[in-house]
Image (tube, helix red, strand yellow):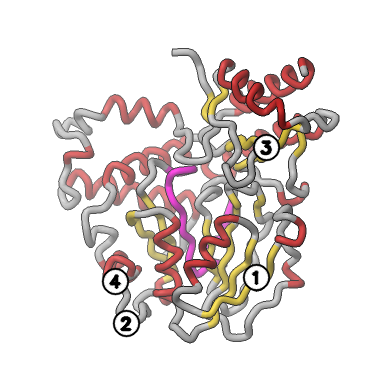
Amino acid sequence: MTQVYNFSSGPAVLPRDVLLTVQAELTDWHGSGMCVMEMSHRGKEFTQIIHEAEADFRKLLNIPANYKVLFIQGGAHFNFSMIPLNLATETSVVDYVDTGHWSRIAIKEARRYANVNIAASNEDRHGSYVPDEAGWKRSDNAAYLHYCSNETIGGVEFPFAPESGDTPLVCDMSSNILSRTLDVSKFGLIYAGAQKNIGPSGLNLVIVREDLLGNARVGTPTMLDYQVHAAADSLYNTPPTFGIYVAGLVFKWLLANGGVPAMEARNIEKASLLYETIDASSGFYNCPIERPFRSRMNVPFRLADEALDDAFLEAAQAHGLLQLKGHRSVGGMRASIYNAMPLEGVRVLSEFMRDFARGH
């Protein structure tokens, strides 16, 4: 097969070594004679898989002992409801920072269950930056402070973790978890859909401080109660077993390749190369995001002459560069360069972009 590089925003590229392991083990996991998709989630084989996955995930992020790790179904959308149902009451005020599409979806859902205060927003500059924390208008008695650390569509990434004091800090890290070093102890709850930096879609990881468990409001559906999943070690119901298995392989791949610090260094190199290509194009390409807040994971860019968009995408595909079309809500182009995207893929894309600009 001709080499291709997949820049999809999610479901996204997986490490080739992981895919080869999945291929080799697909019909017979470790001599069991079973595929992971055929195993009982309560059998000894899968028990080993999920325990190793959690241990490796904890090691990668140095997760403190007083935090639970949950492997549950659904993506970030489940948490948009679960968070206010578990951490707030109907009369609570909850603080949200609005930095783009996914922040706004979370805000819309939270308004069904609590009183939302928008502590800060970047709409005044077309979503191109992260508001200065000193200017945030936070509530005195907020049940929690929520933000999205990386806006997959807009390409805005927080270069810092907010200071929340005694208010639990809650973060949607779906598109940049495991891509940079992180102090988990600053957070009350972190959640992430797996389909960008961890594994297949359908799996959702939650890191939650134990003191925040057990407070779900009356009437919360059983499956939306974090405590239920924590008490059952993520096995209250049949979990997404194959997704957990692949996630565990990704965690082992990360550990074997230097862990999160090494991955962060590679991500900086990849993003720097791509942004330099855009900025050096004399206006042929442009990135709408202000430089201090440019995402290392999702690089949006536009061609100055939008009439060339289709030609760009067709030529890119002919060069084995796939899934570069921007989200339908914003248009343009977007290159998602998650952990599994090799540096060589970004080099090939950058060279193609330079060639295309020279030719047009």
Q: CA distance from mark 3 to mark 1?
A: 26 Å
Does the magenta-highlighted stretch encompass residue 185? yes
- Specify which label sits upstream in the sequence, 3 or 2: 2
Q: CA distance from mark 2 to mark 1?
A: 30 Å
Position above or below: 260 against 324: below
Give the image location of residue 122, x and y in percent.
71, 61
Give the image location of residue 321, x and y in percent.
57, 23
For the record, the magenta segment spans: 181-198
Q: Which residue is mark 3?
A: 271
Front tag of 3 and 2: 2
Q: Which residue is mark 2?
A: 218
Say what amino acid the circle numbered 4 marks: Pro
Say what amino acid the circle numbered 3 marks: Ala
Q: CA distance from mark 3 to mark 2?
A: 46 Å
Front tag of 4 and 3: 4
Say what amino acid the circle numbered 1 marks: Glu
State the SS at label 2. Answer: loop
Q: CA distance from mark 4 to mark 3?
A: 42 Å
Q: Quadrant of the C terminus?
A: top right
- Specify which label sits upstream in the sequence, 3 or 1: 1
The residue under the point 34% across, 28% down is 21
Position above or below: 46 against 144: above
